Amino acid sequence: AQRVTQPEKLLSVFKGAPVELKCNYSYSGSPELFWYVQYSRQRLQLLLRHISRESIKGFTADLNKGETSFHLKKPFAQEEDSAMYYCAFPYNYGQNFVFGPGTRLSVLP
Amino acid sequence: DADVTQTPRNRITKTGKRIMLECSQTKGHDRMYWYRQDPGLGLRLIYYSFDVKDINKGEISDGYSVSRQAQAKFSLSLESAIPNQTALYFCATGSGWNYGYTFGSGTRLTVV
C-alpha cells in the first residue's frame, strides 16, 4: 500500500544551521513527490514539487529512488522557517494524495 | 480574498448533534476534497469529488457525508457527532495532481 513516513515528529535546529527533513515513501510505482508547509495559524500551502525541480525559499528536495526518499534540505535555516512540513505524493492515478504525519521544524535564535 | 473559504472557523458542538462544515472556492477547480488533521497522523482523506455528480469515499468516510452543491461548493456533514471526530478539518481544491492542492484555512471542530 502507498505510504509516506516522516520519522521525526519534531526537529530543532539553530538559526544558520543546515536542516534536513526526512521523507520516505512506499509505492509500487514511481511517484512524483511534494512538500507542503503549514506556518502557525495558517493554511497548508505547497512548498515545492519534485516534478518542477524548483527551489522555494532556499529549500530543495531530491528524489532518491534507490532509497525511496525525498528529503527536504536547506543550507542555512531561518527563524521564519519554523513550521509543520508534510511530504505527500499522488496516488490512484493522480486522483488523491497521501500525506505523511508531518515534522514540526523549530528554528532557534 | 481567500480563494478557498471554510466556514465556520471554529465550532463546539455536543455529542449526537448534526453539524455541517462548508467550503467554497473561487479557483475554478473541478476537484474538491475534505481532509481531517489529527496530531501525529497527518492528513487523512474523508471524501472527494471531481464534479457535481461525482462523490467518492476516502479512507475514513464512516460517520461523515458530503454534498457537492455546485462546482464551487462542497459541504461536509457529521450526522451524529461523536467526541473522536474532534479534529481540524481542511477543504482542498485541485485542477490536476501535478499542481498540488490549494487548501482552506481549516475548521477546528470540538465535540463534547
Image (cartoon, coloured by chain):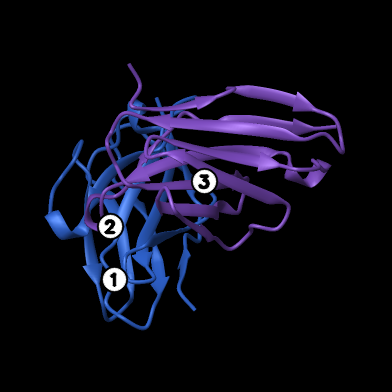
Chain purple in the figure, letter: B
Q: Amino acid at mark 2?
A: Trp
In the picture of the structure, the residue carrying the numbered disc 3 is: B34
In the picture of the structure, the residue carrying the numbered disc 2 is: B97
Chain blue in the figure, letter: A
Label drawn at residue A31: 1
Give the secondary structure at mark 3.
Answer: strand
Give the secondary structure at mark 2.
Answer: helix
Q: Calculate the distance from the C-alpha at mark 3 to the C-alpha at mark 1.
A: 22 Å
Q: Amino acid at mark 1?
A: Pro
| Residue at left offset 30%, top offset 53% | A72
- Chain of the residue under the numbered disc 3 shown in the image: B
Q: Amino acid at mark 3?
A: Trp
Q: Nearer the viewer, mark 3 or mark 1?
A: 3
Q: Is residue B111 left or right of residue B92?
A: right
Q: Which part of the image, by quadrant, shows the C terminus of chain B? A: top right
User: Which of the two residues, A7 or A50, is positioned nearer the viewer here?
Assistant: A50
